[in-house]
Amino acid sequence: MLNIECIDKYFGQNCLFKEASLIVNPNEKVGFVGPNGTGKTTLFRLIEGTQEVDSGKLSIIANTRVGVLRQELDESHRSLLLETIEGDPELTALRLEREKLQQSLEDSSTQPLESVTNRMGEIEHRLEEIDAFRAESRAGAILLGLGFSKTDLDRPLSDFSGGWRMRVALARLLFSRADLMLLDEPTNHLDLESVAWLEKHLANMSGTVMIISHDRGFLNRVTKVTIALENHAIVRYAGSFDSYEKQREERRRLLIKSADRQDQEIEQIEKFINRFRAQANKAKQVQSRIKHLEKIVRIERPDRDHAPPVIRLPNPPPCAYEVLTLQGVSKQFEDNILFKKISLKLEKGKKVGLLGPNGAGKSSLLKIITSSLTADEGSVTLGDRVKIAHFAQHTLESLNQEHTIIESAQESAPSSCNDRELRTVLGGFLFSGDTVFKSVKVLSGGEKARLALARLFLSGANVLLLDEPTNHLDMGARAALQKALEAYTGTLIIITHDRDLMEGVCDHFWIVGNEKVTLWDRELSQYLEEVSQIDGEQKEIESQPFDSEDRAPPKMGNRELRQETARIRQTLSKNTKKNRERIKKIEKEIQNMESELKELETKLADPQLHENQDKTELKELVSKSGRLNSSLIEHMAEWEDLSIDIEQHELEAKNALDQLK
């Protein structure tokens, strides 16, 4: 399908690709990963043909239809359905030609020509081959899957905002029957439910799909091949993103090992050359080794892996157990009713995920809680000492661009907060050293998002309302934020299209939709399975009302069970965290020691070492080998003790979970 051979690509002095090669086969689902700036989007442009390689060759099988996800659509007054169908140019052209031919046949002044009727037959046959007679139903199913309602299908594109137009652009591409599809961040502007539908659709569709995404879970559930852009090369790995990480670590280890062996070989050759260079009887051997040295192709060592980022959240200040109460709240915009007399309560320490499609009122609910949006009726009551902080996309836009990072943080913090405390919190959000003096206006989207989150925690809030907090964050920062929120002891309500974040952090779910807010007391995966099956009319998901006098008795998966299960797992994680971290460190140390011992054994096996009259080097190597062996035995014993301790905690947790069943 796609063949890239030894390409180079530069932007000025910046090298993106150097002799990079890649093969992608038909019908493969491929994920592209790599830090920002390594050339993922540029590679897509090279494949699309909007940019050219500086050298090398990039070829695609002839007649391959390449489809690209456009970041915006031109202004149009066509309906969403027609706009989506326009994504298939062949279908559109055939229908237009058929219409013109039919008009010519109906024209009484024009005698039907045999060539016209023959062409009409050819068109009808081709339209049948490409399933044109179901085009409207197929396009409609895609639009519904991406979150549009049935009444939206006949509305003009111009009625919709930029985020919804992006969904139409995605719908056009999915409808286009492209043989090779290039998707750059396709989950942007989608809600959790639409992402779940898209995952299924991409996994089941034919054709080759290439995806750039910072959503690790999305890549794991869709792709079967991972392409990593690293060290100016394009490296192919079989398997999903998780599989790639394991393979990459093993490949890195082997490269380092090979480079170490090569360094040893070069060192030995250079020693021989330097030692015997002046001896005439060794001249031939010296010249031979010099030539051999010149022919050695140096193994390029992989870049040192940076430690994964760790975000540390300060503990929230204390507050009342009953954090928040909504009583009889209603809200509507013109004819659009979001809520009708909803009542709900939120207790301290709960982490709630809001479910429901975009437009159902999730963001409006958070704004009503913060009083930035006034309810039409009803009341919102906060508990004693409750302080709410709200993160939304406008939060980034409201940052003072002229401030430095530390000035921006100081603006949000109480006056009693000193410089050391400010730096501690900023350091927890990956701003350390002199970086705190960078101007806000030069920060990337991800850096601004982290600064906005840091300001939230500096504000002394104990209830967080987070609306898409992972937008603009790269994969490492997303994972760090998820771990931080999992460990956070305060209360939060979160809206996110990141399924891994929602599953990892939240222990309760509220469904917003159909003018109400209801409880979902089962697993998130079950909810997503149900909503992603919708193919046509929208249906209401069965969920538990907040106030029900005839509530069924507790059963598996209810709120109390989920809370207790989460508590047991959190306790297990807390009790084993230090041991797991120590085990990981010990395993690396053991690996290094074993590698070093093998090198020593190789050196000790050298006959020349034992023939030398000066035994100093031999004694040093033997002594070092003994020390390493002793240290290795101690490390293995510690590893075993820690593993036994973890197993004991896991057994206790398992028994506790079994008793809940």
Image: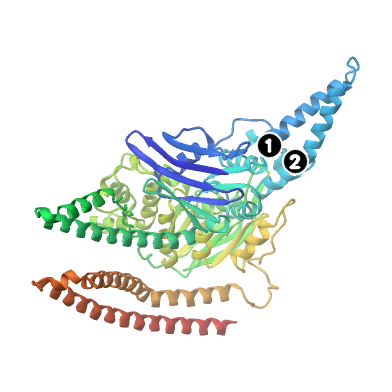
Amino acid identity at mark 2: Ile
Residue that badge 2 annotates: 130
Name the spot of residue 539 as percent of width and height, x first.
Answer: 72, 56
Amino acid identity at mark 1: Asp
Name the spot of residue 188 as percent of width and height, x first.
Answer: 53, 47
522 or 382: which is nearer to us? 522
Q: Callout 2 environment at 10 Å: few (<14), some (14 to 19), or many (20+)?
A: few
Q: For the image shown, how many numbered marks are present on the structure?
A: 2
572 or 105: which is nearer to us? 105
Look at the image and tell me whether residue 498 can be seen: no
Residue that badge 1 annotates: 88
Image-based side of 310 in relation to 192, left or right: left
- Placement of 574 over or under 533, stated as above or below: below
Which mark, by number, is residue 340? Answer: none
The residue shown at (9%, 55%) is 279
Image-based side of 632 in relation to 622, left or right: right
The residue shown at (44%, 77%) is 572
Image-based side of 335 in relation to 215, left or right: right
Name the spot of residue 546 as percent of width and height, x first.
Answer: 63, 66
Look at the image and tell me whether residue 216 can be seen: yes
Q: Earlier in the sequence, mark 2 or mark 1?
A: 1
Per the image, label 1 sits on a secondary structure element best described as loop
The residue shown at (28%, 71%) is 598
Per the image, label 2 sits on a secondary structure element best described as loop
Marks 2 and 1, Cα distance to the nearest angstrom? 10 Å
Image-based side of 521 in relation to 568, left or right: right
- Residue reaching furthest front? 281
Image quarter in which the N terminus is found: top right
478 or 425: which is nearer to us? 478
Q: Are marks 2 and 1 in contact (CB under 8 Å)?
A: yes
Name the spot of residue 301 as percent of width and height, x first.
Answer: 31, 54
